[in-house]
Each structure stands twice: as structure tokens, then as C-alpha cells.
Image (cartoon, rainbow, N blue to C red):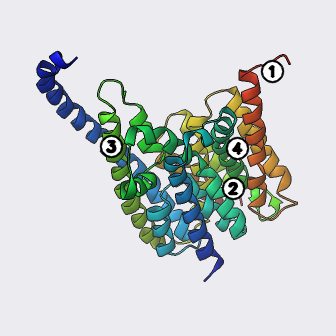
């Protein structure tokens, strides 16, 4: 290999410049796409009764859309703070698994790791894992993670503020159908995950369970209870993949 | 401090600690098939439960109102591969129009 690096080196650098430009363009594109969602989050949060400051803090410090929407959704629906927090954090559990797959690629320590953790979300992970790490020691993958994470962070926060400030001008949320925007936002979030019959089964079982429990439990708690559907589905999935050893 | 502030702070901390845990804990702790399978199913279950409750619940009561029409419109928009903002706006506009026309609560 070392005899080749001299020739490949300059070509490799040119190729890297092109690749880096492509990744940057993609990162900006994802940021702009996410901004549309950020505007709706800001507007729905403020019309639902949270302050502009609370809404902005969520986007800057929580910075994981599904969990943010879950928190305000449960609070706006009159659920208790505890179930709102629990639902929000449970939805964020996937970020831990993103971090798990990103850590060997990022190889960060100290303060850098604290920042990398904050930027570990759906978009940055998806963009990073879409790059092969075999030929360039993960350089493109790392760059995609940071570029996408930073781009989404900037656009997401600006968009949230825009939506939050604009919400005051909107008026009565119900007359505008903003209460219907909340479930629409959730179905749009889950839509890419409903890829097969198994996902639909989990989703519909959870939806049915939440509705059946609604009359009996405080708002927010029924949603939390559907975590058991995920546990059962996960255990069954593992059993299905690895048949029982004959003991 | 209001309950909303406590919820914002606690959930923000919880979500950050979760993110940091993924970057920090030993691989073997989270890298088990069953943990991975449950974590994959969790967003599907919670998000679909949220869809159901946010569409049909008013407090502890279940109702069918303009939100359901909004959800149906959102699903049509998703089937037509509309982007996020379009899906949300279509749902809101559907509910708003039905209410303005006096066709739904």
C-alpha cells in the first residue's frame, strides 16, 4: 500500500475536496428541510401555552425533534409533567444507539465528546452512516456527522424561534386547526419507520392500547404504557431471529 | 417554578444524558440483540400512541372531531410523498375548514 500512496495521494485529495463539497451541500439541504419542521414546532409549542423562552430552550438544549414534540404534546393535552418527561426521554433512547454506532467513527474525547453527544440525532447519524468508512478511515463519515449536526442545529433553532415569535400573530389555535397539526406531525415522524407489517403491527397495537387506556388513566400515562408493546415486540423479534437452542 | 419549567428542564437533561450515554458507555452494555430490538420498536410504539391520543382524546374522553379529518388528510399527503411542513399544514387547514364550515367540532 505504501508504494501507492504517493500516486494516489494528490488524486485522493482532489477527490476529497469534491466529496466534501457534496457532503456540505447535503448537510445544508437537510438543515433547510428540518427548518420547516422547526417552524411548526415553535408555533405549536407557543400556541399550546409554552413561552418563547421554554420553546427555544427545548430546541437548543434538548435538540431532538421527536422528544421535543412528545413533551409539548403531552403537556398541551393536559398530561402530568412526569409522564411528559418520561415519554420524551423514552423517545430519545434511540439517540443512545446512534451514539453507540457513531463513537468508533468519531473517536472524540473530553469537551468534543460533549458536543458530539448533543449533535447525535436522526439526521447527523443517517448522513454519517450513509458514507463508507472502509477506504478513508471514516473521514467522510466524520465530516458528514459534524456538517449535518451543525447545519441542523443552526436551522432548527432559527426556525423554532421564527415559529415561536410568529405564533402570537396566528390567534386561536383551534380555529386554525393547529390541534390537528400535532397528530399530523407525529404521523409524519413515524411514517418512514412504518416499512413493513411488523412495524404496522407494533404501531397499531400501541395506538389501540393507548386509546383503550385513555378513559382510565391521567392524560400522558396511556402513551407511556405503550412502551410495553415495544418491549414485547423486541423480545419476540430476538426469539424469532434466533430459534430456541435445543437444551 | 411552574410544572412546565420542571418538565422542560428534566426532559432536556434526560435526553442529553441519553445521548451522552451512547457515546460513553462500554459497547457491551447496549450492544445486545434484545436491547437493540426493543429500542428499534420504541419510537414506533410511542409515536403511534401519540398519534392516536392526540387525534381522539380530550382529557380522558374519546371523541371524533375535526382532528380525525386532519389526520386522514395528513395520511393522504404522506402517501403522495409530501414533505413534513405540507403534511402538517394540510392537516391543520382541513380541520380549520371543516370547523369554519360548521361541519365538525
Image position of A102 (left or right of A5): right
Q: Chain of mark 1?
A: A
| C-alpha gap between disc 1 and disc 4 | 26 Å
| C-alpha gap between disc 4 and disc 2 | 14 Å
Q: Nearer the viewer, mark 2 or mark 1?
A: 1
Residue B47, given in percent of the width and then of the height, sits at 65, 47
Q: Give the position of the C terminus of chain A as an image quadrant.
A: top right
Element carrying mark 4: helix
Quick check: do tags 3 and 1 share a chain?
Answer: yes
Residue B30, given in percent of the width and then of the height, sits at 61, 41
Quick check: do tags 3 and 2 share a chain?
Answer: no
Which residue is under mark 4?
B45
| C-alpha gap between disc 4 and disc 3 | 29 Å
Residue A131, given in percent of the width and then of the height, sits at 36, 30
Check the image and report above or below for B29 versus A118. above
The numbered mark at residue A27 is: 3
Q: Chain of mark 2?
A: B
Quick check: do tags 4 and 2 share a chain?
Answer: yes
Residue drawn where x is 46% and y is 62% of the image? A59
Comparing B102 with A123, the one in front is A123
Q: Chain of mark 3?
A: A
Element carrying mark 2: helix
Dot 3, crowdedness within 10 Å: few (<14), some or many (≥20)? many
Element carrying mark 3: helix
Residue B8 seen in the figure: yes
Quick check: do tags 1 and 4 share a chain?
Answer: no
Which residue is under mark 2?
B54
The numbered mark at residue B86 is: none
Amino acid at each position: 500500500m505504501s508504494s501507492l500512496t504517493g500516486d494516489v495521494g494528490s488524486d485522493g485529495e482532489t477527490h476529497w475536496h469534491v466529496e466534501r463539497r457534496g457532503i456540505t451541500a447535503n448537510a445544508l439541504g437537510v438543515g433547510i428541510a428540518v427548518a420547516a419542521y422547526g417552524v411548526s414546532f415553535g408555533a405549536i409549542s407557543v400556541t399550546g401555552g409554552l413561552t418563547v423562552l421554554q420553546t427555544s430552550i427545548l430546541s437548543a438544549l434538548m435538540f431532538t425533534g421527536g422528544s421535543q414534540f412528545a413533551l409539548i404534546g403531552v403537556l398541551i393535552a393536559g398530561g402530568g409533567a412526569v409522564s411528559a418527561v418520561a415519554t420524551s426521554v423514552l423517545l430519545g433512547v434511540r439517540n443512545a444507539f446512534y451514539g453507540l454506532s457513531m463513537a468508533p467513527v468519531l473517536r472524540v474525547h473530553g469537551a468534543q465528546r460533549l458536543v458530539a453527544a448533543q449533535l447525535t440525532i436522526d439526521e447527523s447519524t443517517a448522513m454519517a452512516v450513509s458514507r463508507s468508512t472502509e477506504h478513508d478511515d471514516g473521514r467522510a463519515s466524520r465530516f458528514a456527522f459534524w456538517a449535518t449536526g451543525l447545519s441542523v442545529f443552526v436551522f432548527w433553532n432559527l426556525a423554532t424561534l421564527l415559529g415561536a415569535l410568529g405564533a402570537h400573530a396566528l390567534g386561536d389555535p383551534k380555529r386554525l386547526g393547529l390541534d390537528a397539526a400535532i397528530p399530523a406531525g407525529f404521523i409524519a415522524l413515524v411514517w418512514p419507520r412504518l416499512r413493513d407489517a411488523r412495524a404496522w403491527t407494533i404501531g397499531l397495537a400501541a395506538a389501540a392500547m393507548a386509546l383503550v387506556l385513555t378513559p382510565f388513566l391521567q392524560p400522558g400515562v396511556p402513551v407511556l404504557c405503550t412502551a410495553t408493546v415495544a418491549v414485547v415486540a423486541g423480545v419476540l423479534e430476538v426469539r424469532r431471529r434466533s430459534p430456541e437452542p435445543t437444551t | 417554578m411552574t410544572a412546565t419549567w420542571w418538565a422542560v428542564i428534566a426532559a432536556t437533561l434526560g435526553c442529553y444524558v441519553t445521548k451522552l450515554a451512547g457515546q460513553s458507555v462500554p459497547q457491551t452494555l447496549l450492544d445486545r440483540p434484545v436491547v437493540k430490538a426493543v429500542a428499534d420498536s420504541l419510537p414506533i410504539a410511542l409515536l403511534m400512541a401519540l398519534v392516536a391520543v392526540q387525534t381522539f382524546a380530550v382529557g380522558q374522553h374519546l371523541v371524533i372531531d375535526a382532528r380525525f379529518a386532519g389526520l386522514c388528510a395528513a395520511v393522504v399527503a404522506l402517501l403522495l410523498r409530501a414533505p413534513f411542513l405540507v403534511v402538517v399544514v394540510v392537516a391543520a387547514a382541513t380541520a380549520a375548514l371543516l370547523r369554519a364550515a360548521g361541519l365538525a367540532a
